[in-house]
């Protein structure tokens, strides 16, 4: 069983700030309590000499109490059978009045404008008597009691400045049964009005659904000011959005705008006296495309950056020139090869042309009569060979053999594989065409030589070189015996050569 009471030598109703207080905790327990704890407003108290809290046996000592020390105190005892809590003992500390709001209050007023001042204090006992003082430029004056009222711990004053000397500092003082207020409540009354309009407002950044506006603040009217942005939807100027900035600089951001809508933007500076004249930005439209509007001044170019850009451009030009030169060189090498191949193909087609319809002997040489009388009497005209060089070959039909390289007597050097791979396409095609052309020219030369030999032999024996188709019947009749003799003489010629010569 635990009971708590204040010290018997203390008057609970007459404890002021700075006094010392102690409490006594009486415990009846069996077995004896092994633990004792103290609590202030439900929070346990620990021994702290520096803070003026001393725990001694069954006593609690509080040195230099303050208003924060006031409240309910209890003690708790515990033994093996359980624990018990005492009754609460209330400590009331009386103190002189103090301002509830420690900061100074600033008020702006025009001449002949009345401002209401409210002074509220904390005090115990709460019955407080007030008086007011006015100070400007070092002159201290009492405010007549008729100009203010007091109720409990609150006093009100209606103050009206008339001249410039009426602007200054008003102080509120209070006293009670404990004593006078040590620090007054201060009110600064200044000549003030509505703030001046904002200046140099501009849309710094605008997107499809957001807006960022910046301004410069002007005179605040002598009072703390805040800033306001309103968006009015066009064309009806219906208020849609507003943004407030508590302190400068005035920078406004708004998000979640409706694309496709147009707004008029009004910007204000606001203080206790009201709003300034608006700064208006006409027709801001959210078109759904991001737009950035910033300072129009061009950025200076860095010399190092300029040099790097110039170097990069120069290197690009050089690379382009090298590529063009390589391309032209490649084309220059390629065109002669193509021209050469075209010439070889043309020569090949020319070699493929058949023998002229005029007859094989007609191409061997021009014709002259061997016997002059034969020409006048309608005899046979024999073609004579007027070549400048005589045929030294004893055979009737000259033999021509294909010249082939002496592969067995000379060492063949081959092109390295890497070079053959580069030229194989063009050179293979060119080689095939050259070989085919050589074979065809060789065959044609052999054919022409054989035809010329046969024709020359027939001419010496009196056979005409003209075609039997172009001769008359007499010619065919007179030449019949000769043609009969020609058969067994030319034993190595083909039938085609004989027919051509005939």
Image (tube, rainbow, N blue to C red):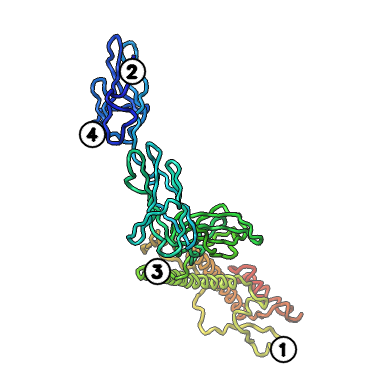
* Residue 51 placement: quadrant: top left
Q: Nearer the viewer, residue 177 or 423?
A: 177
- In the structure shown, which secondary structural element does the residue marked by tag 3 occupy? helix
Measured in 3D between alpha carbons, the distance from the residue under mark 1 to the one under mark 4, in whole angstroms, is: 170 Å
Q: At which x and y percent is residue 314?
A: 40, 71
From the image, tell me which residue sits under label 1.
377
Q: Count residues near mark 1 (Cα–Cα under 10 Å), then give few for <14, some for 14-19, many for 20+.
A: few
Which disc number belongs to residue 3? Answer: 2
Q: Is residue 207 rendered to the left or right of residue 18?
A: right
From the image, tell me which residue sits under label 4.
50
Q: Quadrant of the C terminus?
A: bottom right
Q: Nearer the viewer, residue 170 or 324?
A: 170
Q: Is residue 205 above or below residue 7?
A: below
Q: Nearer the viewer, mark 1 or mark 2?
A: 2
Compare marks 2 and 4 and give the one earlier in the sequence.
2
Measured in 3D between alpha carbons, the distance from the residue under mark 1 to the one under mark 2, in whole angstroms, is: 183 Å
From the image, tell me which residue sits under label 3.
309
Measured in 3D between alpha carbons, the distance from the residue under mark 2 to the one under mark 4, in whole angstroms, is: 28 Å
Q: Residue furthest top?
A: 30
Compare marks 3 and 2 and give the one earlier in the sequence.
2
Q: Count residues near mark 2 (Cα–Cα under 10 Å), then give few for <14, some for 14-19, many for 20+.
A: some
Q: Nearer the viewer, mark 2 or mark 4?
A: 2
Q: At which x and y percent is residue 381?
A: 67, 84
Compare marks 1 and 4 and give the one earlier in the sequence.
4
For the question of whether residue 74 can be seen, the reply is yes
Q: Residue at x 34, y 28 (%)?
A: 40
- In the structure shown, which secondary structural element does the residue marked by tag 4 occupy? loop
For the question of whether residue 397 can be seen, the reply is no
Q: Is residue 321 above or below residue 134?
A: below
Q: Residue furthest right?
A: 473
């Amino acid at each position: 069983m635990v009971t708590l009471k204040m010290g018997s030598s203390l008057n609970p109703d007459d404890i002021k700030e700075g006094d010392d207080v102690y409490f006594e905790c009486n415990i009846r327990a069996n077995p004896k309590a092994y633990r004792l704890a103290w609590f202030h407003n439900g929070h346990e108290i620990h021994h702290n000499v520096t803070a003026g809290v001393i725990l001694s046996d069954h006593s609690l000592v509080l040195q230099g109490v303050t208003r924060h020390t006031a409240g309910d105190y209890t003690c708790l005892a515990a033994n093996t059978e359980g624990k018990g809590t005492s009754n609460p003992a209330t400590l009331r500390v009386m103190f002189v009045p103090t301002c509830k709001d420690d900061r100074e209050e600033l008020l702006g007023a025009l001449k002949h404008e009345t401002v209401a001042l409210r002074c509220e204090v904390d005090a115990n006992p709460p019955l407080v008597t007030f008086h007011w003082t006015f100070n400007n430029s070092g002159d201290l004056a009492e405010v007549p009691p008729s100009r203010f009222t007091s109720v409990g711990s609150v006093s009100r004053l209606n103050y009206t400045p008339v001249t410039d000397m009426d602007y200054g500092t008003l102080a509120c003082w209070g006293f009670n049964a404990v004593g006078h207020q040590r620090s007054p409540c201060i009110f600064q009354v200044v000549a003030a009005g509505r703030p001046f309009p904002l200046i140099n407002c501009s849309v710094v950044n605008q997107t499809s659904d957001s807006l960022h506006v910046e301004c410069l603040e002007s005179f605040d009217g002598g009072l703390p000011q805040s800033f306001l942005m309103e968006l009015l939807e066009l064309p009806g100027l219906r208020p849609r959005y507003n943004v407030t900035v508590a302190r400068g600089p005035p920078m406004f951001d708004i998000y979640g705008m409706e694309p496709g809508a147009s707004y008029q933007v009004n910007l204000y500076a606001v203080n206790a006296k009201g709003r300034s004249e608006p700064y208006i930005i006409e027709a801001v439209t959210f078109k759904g495309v991001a737009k950035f509007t910033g300072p129009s001044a061009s950025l200076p170019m860095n010399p190092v950056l300029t040099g790097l850009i110039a170097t990069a451009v120069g290197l690009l030009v050089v690379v382009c020139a090298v590529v063009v030169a390589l391309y032209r060189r490649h084309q220059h090498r390629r065109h002669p090869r193509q021209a050469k191949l075209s010439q070889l193909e043309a020569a090949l087609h020319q070699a493929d042309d058949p023998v002229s319809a005029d007859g094989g002997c007609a191409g061997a040489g021009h014709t002259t009569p061997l016997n002059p009388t034969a020409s006048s009497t309608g005899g046979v005209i024999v073609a004579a060979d007027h070549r400048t060089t005589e045929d030294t070959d004893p055979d009737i039909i000259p033999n021509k053999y294909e010249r082939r390289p002496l592969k067995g007597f000379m060492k063949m050097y081959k092109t390295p594989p890497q070079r053959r791979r580069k030229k194989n396409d063009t050179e293979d095609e060119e080689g095939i065409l050259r070989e085919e052309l050589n074979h065809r020219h060789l065959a044609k030369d052999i054919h022409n030589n054989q035809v010329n030999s046969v024709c020359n032999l027939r001419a010496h024996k009196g056979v005409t070189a003209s075609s039997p188709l172009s001769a008359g019947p007499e010619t065919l009749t007179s030449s019949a015996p000769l043609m009969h003799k020609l058969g067994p003489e030319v034993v190595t010629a083909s039938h085609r050569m004989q027919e051509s010569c005939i």
